[in-house]
Image (spheres, grey):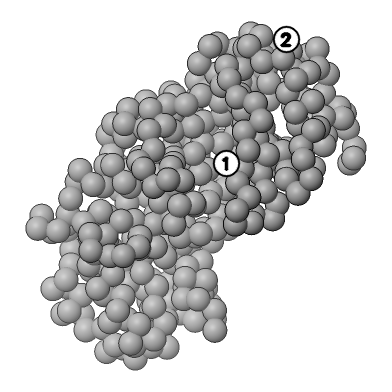
Amino acid sequence: MERPEKVLGPPVSALLERQGYNLVMPSAGGRVTGKGEFGIDVPGAPRPRRVDVVAARWNGDQDIKAVAVECKVTVWAVYDGLGQAVQYQSLFDEVYVATPDTLEKDSIARSTLVDLGLGHIRVVEGTGLAYVSVVPQAQRASRFEPHRKLADITCRLALGLAFLELAACERPLRYGFGQQGRSTWYAEEVVGHLQWNCWWPAYRPDGSRAEETWAGINVEHAGDTRRICSGVSAERLQNTLARLPPQCLLEVSYNPTPPTPGRASVVALEGPAQAATAQDVLDRLRGCPPKYKPGLWLGIRLPTQQSQHFSRSEYVEHLRGVRQHLSPVMEVLQDCYRDCGDV
């Protein structure tokens, strides 16, 4: 049997998108598409909880409205889902439980949902349609923790919402998760898998709290790298790198493929982009050792503590500034795709 979020997630996402939510996970195939579940830390839980569907939209310039949905397809799972949904109320503005319409009508009593402050979404199986059967109550002051929402929810979703304001959207914005769903990345693919991307790393690999948010250009697909190495002009790339401001950083890395325990990613080159030699960058990409794939990242790192307090306009201004600084490099890489066939 398919997982509940795979069955109920798309119609629930479509419903939320019709309500004006611009960022929905998992997406129903609209402006955002991706994989994985949004992770949150719950006091007393041995591991992060993974929310089935998360939706967000701007609520003025200073905040976003965030919605969480727990998807359940059996009566017994519903009761377990109620406990999870109540836990989500500490971090989200509205919380729903979603069930198929084939489930017994009295599997969740309306009075129970109202008492808990939860909403209910019913999904009509076989049609892809969903509707709200119980509207969630206002936030409970005894449960909602606005400082935790700001630190753990707002900054992750605000990055994606700001990205949507800048993306051309010829292809849907992509997202994914790491570190048990707590770290979040977004990417707008320009050509091939060449990306404008940003990454909110909740935790470092050693488990300590991350200090930096990243935004820039990312190349991690082997085919993209081959195109760049075969078609780009080292002289032209050098000219663009030399004109970048000091805060722009460059990194060439080697990533295990397939990911294997005991084989970690290796940083082959790292430093200020303006000081990098284009020929050295290309040589490092070409010299990736066997069983690894090369990756190229060029961008700006922003202290996470600072980004947690950004307003909507500040997020957009920051990401727009990154694009303005790096657009000459992106143009070089895009031209490589136009000039080169498959290699």
Q: Nearer the viewer, residue 109 or 279?
A: 279
Spot the residue most to the left. 142
> Which residue is depicted at the point 16% across and 71% down?
116
Residue 24: x and y, percent? 45, 55
Label 1: few (<14), some (14–19) or many (≥20) C-alpha neighbours in 10 Å: many
- Identify the mark nearer the N-term, 1 or 2: 1
CA–CA distance in space, label 1 to label 2 = 26 Å
Please, which residue is most extreme toward the front here? 262
**Where's residue 52, x and y in %?**
42, 65
Q: Quadrant of residue 192?
A: top right
Q: Is residue 194 left or right of residue 36?
A: right
Instruction: Check residue 187 in the rendering and tell me which mark sits there, or answer none.
Output: 1
Say what secondary structure mark 1 lies in.
Answer: strand
The amino acid type found where label 1 is placed reads Ala
Front position in the image: 57 or 196: 196
Q: Position of residue 21 (x, y in %)?
A: 40, 51
- Whether residue 195 appears in this view of the structure is no
| Residue beneath the point at 28% across and 65% down | 45
Along the line of sight, which residue is nearer the eye, 76 or 54? 76
Task: Report helix, strand or loop for mark 2.
Answer: helix
At 49% from the left and 32% from the top, the residue drawn is 214
- Quadrant housing the C terminus: top right
Left or right relative to 187: residue 17: left
Label 2, on which residue? 239
Q: Is residue 332 above or below residue 235?
A: below
